Amino acid sequence: MIKLAHPVIDDDEKAAVIAALESGQLAQGPRVAAFERAFAAYCGAGHAVAVNSGTAALHLALVAHGIGAGDEVIVPAFSFAATATAVLHAGARPVFADVCDDDFGIDPASAERAITPATRAIIAVHLYGQACRIAEVEALCGPGRITLIEDAAQAVGATAGERRCGSIGTAAFSFYATKNLQTGEGGMITTGDAAVAERARMLRSQGERARYVTEEAGYNFRMTEVAAALGATQLPKIGARNDRRSANAARLTARLEGNPRIVVPREMAGRRHVWHQYTLRVPAGGEARDALQAGLRERGIESAVFYPAPIHRQPLYRRLGYAGVSLPVAERLAGEVLSIPVHPSLSDADVDAVAAAVNDLAR
């Protein structure tokens, strides 16, 4: 079986985890602090705050900016559900925007049409490992007007122009087990705002700056020392691992781009794609996409649909009154997309076998 994802854990990473286990301190401590410093420097951000998941990072990023009841947050409709549920958890209302079908990111024109006097933030998702049109979204937000939140859960190392994702707005990263940098579970907030970072640190630890002095109704969102040890040891390797993903993606594209029944993903000019996923589109959609996936499964190749329904079409949001929302690109993409293996553990022979199977089945 050629797996869709295969976490890479080297011997030095295992040793770092064992050292953390043997240290006697498993909860948040010096390893977490060291990982935060290293990750902030890597992203080019002023501050980094480690938490226990990417969802927690999104939630705290919003709350630390003071976003809550009565506020609206614009989110792309084509993303993982946590992009919008984090807004609900903050007490605000998600407002859905459509996406672009070339980079799968939020459509700035659709986002602009969604702005109202109640808009407090825009969440710009860097989906599948490529930066969205973040400069255009940043311009929409303007200085001090609307908060820009980067959902960089899938984009560790991605760049937009000269800037790395995580250094543009306040950002949320995920270190889930299948991500380019993985700690099993875990997340990180990066920000250039010292006050936002300070509030996020307090909120992740039960609303306490000093132990047992509760200032706000906070959360237990702390990262463990074990997760931080793994993440910090992987961080210096992320460049090489992303390079291997890029090489695999280029090899796939070279073999697939002549197939008229699929659309291969593109690395947009001026952006560095880190290929968390290599996501094809099957323009015939629906049954054709599902048949391709079934055929790959029969040949021992894993694939997945990220995501089979746009967020506004999920049962939760239908119940919340979004049933009448129409976002045609997001709705079409949900029926077309299929992600195939691109991870750094693949051999050239594996990549060639995946491409050959896709070509054969699609034709």
Image (spheres, helix red, strand yellow):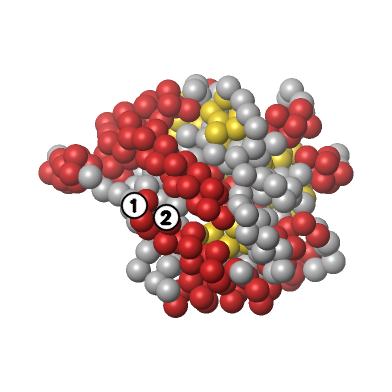
Image height check: is 173 above or below 94? above
The N terminus, quarter of image = bottom left
Q: Nearer the viewer, residue 313 or 305?
A: 305
- Residue to which mark 2 is pinned: 351
Residue 347's tag is 1
Q: Nearer the viewer, residue 127 or 124?
A: 127
SS at mark 2 in the image = helix
Can residue 207 be seen here? The reply is no
**Identity of the residue drawn at 57% across and 25% down:** 163
Q: Quadrant of residue 267?
A: top right
**Identity of the residue drawn at 50% across and 44% down:** 250
CA neighbours of label 1 inside 10 A, class few (<14), some (14 to 19), many (20+): few
Mark 2: which amino acid? Val
**Identity of the residue drawn at 61% across and 52% down:** 257
SS at mark 1 in the image = loop
Mark 1: which amino acid? Ser
